[in-house]
Amino acid sequence: MGPDHTPAPNDPLWPRAAGWLVRRDPDSLPRCDLALLGVPAHATSISPTGAHTTPAAIREALNRYSTYAASHDVDVATLSAFDCGDVTSPDGPSGEARVTAAAAQIAQNCRLLVALGGDNSITHSVMRGVFSEGLEGCGLITVDAHHDLRDGVSNGSPVRRLVEAGLPGSNIVQIGIADFSNSPAYAARAREYGITVVTRADLREADLTGIVRRALDIAGGGGRPVFVDLDVDVCDRAAVPGCPAAAPGGISADELRQLAFLFARDTRVRAMDITEIDATVDANDGRTVRLAALIVLEAAAGLALREEHPAGTILV
């Protein structure tokens, strides 16, 4: 199965989000609000995946949507936004070095970098690039069903690798950690590192705005810059059939959209990634890839509203 590629009608009064993004080589990227970078990593995934096809699929899905968020009365087309293409062969040591170099170059010239995965291994290389001066004074928020603290190098190890590279565990918040998706050993490792864990069960009775505020106060305490990892398998499997590791009972697609918007609205958030979608196994209606495209737009809407509400003020 794969996404529906039925052509959409053209209407000059209904511009498509895909047309808003201007393609630009990172070497000639001007100062801008938002930059996209495709990172089609897949080779070290624990389970075989076609996640390398996903950045292109997300770009295609942006043709399905406009740039206008009615609930906020904001048109993200007012932002300067560039698509910097994909990093070639981003897996392995040399590939990760290319990702890190590209992310470092792009992050210097944009207010928010959004990396399109690819599997979750990209969180390590992209974050290291964005904060190339060092991880000690940075924060990480993961929205993910999994701790990603495994041994080795895979899509299950980026958080552990970042801690070993200097990111303090006390500056990490993990939101959405699911039952029966992790092991006692890695839960103990999270506690040992000092990571703040917000489980899927915690979210059921919680206010998302409060969760975001608390996560930013921990990861971004003292004004620290923050990276946000949005692993789409945190969602209910019915909503994201293109995420092989998603389980029934995850958060809703709408909740993940809200989280993307709220995090992007805070000035401490310097970059995000969107990971763990395999476009080759998505439903025929392309619902998983379409959600990823909407996450890009939600992040853009949050970014567009940043000036009205300074860092630390999260409003819905």
Image: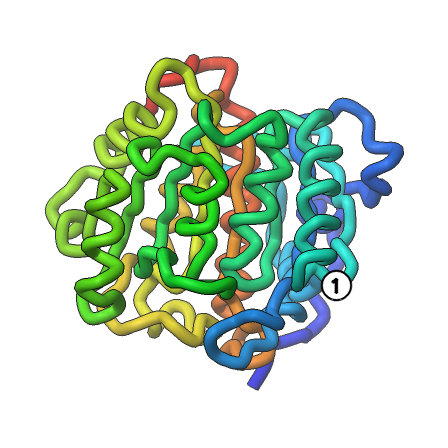
* Residue 3 visible: no
Residue 204 location in percent, x, y? 15, 51
Is residue 246 found left or right of 155 in the rendered image? left
Most extreme residue toward the right is 28
Examine the rendered structure and indicate whether residue 108 appears above or below residue 100. Answer: above
Is residue 62 found left or right of 22 in the rendered image? left
Residue 143 location in percent, x, y? 36, 49
Most extreme residue toward the bottom is 1
Q: Which residue position holds label 1?
A: 89
Is residue 183 found left or right of 2 in the rendered image? left
Residue 226 location in percent, x, y? 46, 30
* Residue 308 visible: yes
Examine the rendered structure and indicate whether residue 130 appears above or below residue 198. Answer: above
Front in this rendered view, residue 60 or 269: 269
Q: How is the image coloured?
A: rainbow
Residue type indicated by callout 1: Ser
Residue shown at 50% from the left, 49% from the top: 295
Examine the rendered structure and indicate whether residue 162 appears above or below residue 276. Answer: above
Front in this rendered view, residue 220 or 157: 157
Residue 57 location in percent, x, y? 66, 65
Q: Tag 1, which secondary structure? A: loop
Residue shown at 33% from the left, 24% from the top: 314
Q: Quadrant of the N terminus?
A: bottom right
Residue density around tag 1, few if under 14, some if 14–19, many if 20 or more, within 10 Å = some
Residue shown at 22% from the left, 67% from the top: 183
Q: Quadrant of the C terminus?
A: top left
Front in this rendered view, residue 11 or 171: 171
